[in-house]
Image (cartoon, grey):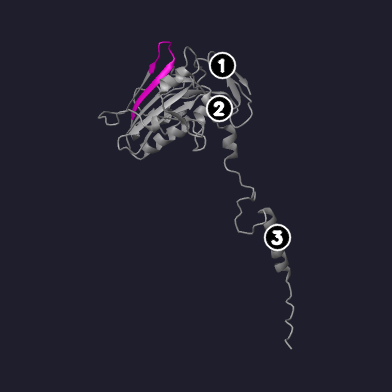
Amino acid sequence: MAKRKKKQKVTPAQTIITILTAILIVLCGGRATGQFSNINLGYSQNVKTSQNTPNKELASSVLTDNVKKQLGNSIVYNGHGAFIINNNKNDLNAHISSAPYAVNEVDELGRAHIGNAWLNKTSRQYKSREKTGNGRTSWKPKGFHQLTNLPGEYKHAYDRGHLLGYALVGGVRGFNASESNEANIATQTAWANEARSKNSTGQNYYEGLVRKALDQNKQVRYRVTDVYDGNNVIPSGAHLEAKSSDGSLEFNVFVPNVQTNIKINYETGYATKN
């Protein structure tokens, strides 16, 4: 006659493991596979950024036929608030034998229009505006009608938006890098000017790519064109192009002058809260 096997004792730890396993099976839809993709572990990827980054509909709202004509045929939303133009390729000549320079052009209506620059590490400015005499100002560009106490990450509507950024060209001798240079400053939304992450690509994000290249002793040809729709005082966005002489950096993008918490009248600059 076969002997009976002794009944094994179940320890408290084993009981807890059994209960947890059962819970996991239920949560995973009856499959104890060891994959936890269906379980909310409390992680959220860039929730704050996604709430404040213009979606495709808002970003595209400034792409009138006139604006698209100025940008060209290839305009593709990048998924992070801006647009890729011409597959990120541009016609800039990055093989120049000259000292760094920075120049501006206004259009026939006196609006800040184009910023052209040839940059290297000596053009970089690491000092604050206050230390170089280019501090804050009360001067306002065309259409600058501020709104404050807005909901979301960007609490105000507008910045004094530069074409050629202070950190890039502040070291160029003779260039007016102040915030009151009417040829280099236009009314720009806080998002379009300040956003700088891979998931929220405002102008500061692309300027960061140029800053990094200059810090690595690269030479960069850089152009910014504010794009206007007709006689509007507020630009529809900023067309940014860059190319390094060694070919390691090149982009061609359009950052729309929009913001999720406001609606802008581009003819006058007046905005209302969403």
| Residue farthest toward the bottom in the current orientation of the protein | 1
Name the amino acid type tagged 2.
Answer: Glu
Q: For residue 34, what is the image quadrant? A: bottom right
Name the amino acid type tagged 3.
Answer: Ala
Q: Which residue is mark 2?
A: 57
Residue 271 screen position, x and y as percent:
59, 18
Residue 136 screen position, x and y as percent:
50, 23
Name the amino acid type tagged 1.
Answer: Asn
Label 2 to label 1: alpha-carbon separation:
17 Å
Marker disc for residue 265 = 1
Which of discs 1 and 3 lies nearer the camera? The answer is 3
SS type, badge 2: helix
Q: Earlier in the sequence, mark 3 or mark 2?
A: 3
Marker disc for residue 22 = 3
What residue appears at the point 57 percent right and 23 percent down from the top-left corner?
Answer: 157
SS type, badge 3: helix
**Which class describes the residues within 10 Å of circle 3: few (<14), some (14-19), or many (20+)?**
some
For residue 106: magenta?
Answer: yes
Q: Which residues are magenta?
A: 105-118
Q: For residue 274, what is the image quadrant? A: top right
Q: Earlier in the sequence, mark 2 or mark 1?
A: 2
